[in-house]
Image (cartoon, rainbow, N blue to C red):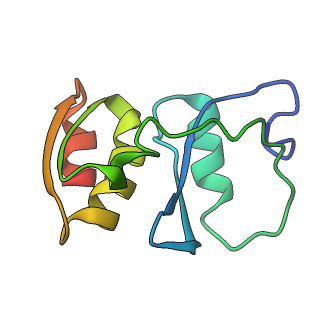
Amino acid sequence: NIPWVNDKQWHPYSLFEDPSDPRIQQMFLMKVGDWTGDVHKALTRDTKRPCWIKGPFPSPYSHAGKYDNQILVASGIGITPALAAINAFKSQRRINLIWACRDPEMLEFFL
């Protein structure tokens, strides 16, 4: 929940950290409607306002480092934890990615 956008609405988003450096964290929130548009508009400048987060929920790739050959499967914004695994292990492992995505803009953004 981001109360300074709308204190009545909760929306999912993807937050992940680089497994090789937990100090590096990123959040992806795709602008697809009124609420996410309002968030993007509010964040065009630096802010230190609060957000309420429920989670974290574990990554489906949390054990990826145990395997030499990886097949990562993701859909839509679920690409974000796959990207963290790819970035962490791309020089050490063979990685294959299967990503189902219906939004061409998302493909352009992430690739």
Q: Residue at x 66, y 29 (%)?
A: 11
Query: In which quadrant will I find the N terminus?
Result: top right
* 1 left or right of 26 in image: right
* Residue 58, placed above or below residue 25: above
Say which quarter of the image contains residue 90: bottom left
Residue appearing at x 64%, y 61% in the figure: 43
Q: Is residue 110 above or below residue 89?
A: above
At horizontal 34% and vertical 41% (from top left) the residue drawn is 79
Q: Quadrant of the C terminus?
A: bottom left
Q: Is residue 22 left or right of residue 105?
A: right
Quadrant of residue 58 in the image?
top right
| Residue closest to the eye, 71 or 100 | 71
Name the foreground residue: 46 vs 110: 110
Q: Position of residue 7 (x, y in %)?
A: 88, 33
Residue displayed at 20% across by 68% down: 92
Q: Is residue 71 left or right of residue 21?
A: left
**Closer to us: 98 or 30:** 98
Relative to 44, residue 38 above or below: above
The image position of residue 53, as x and y in percent, is 78, 42
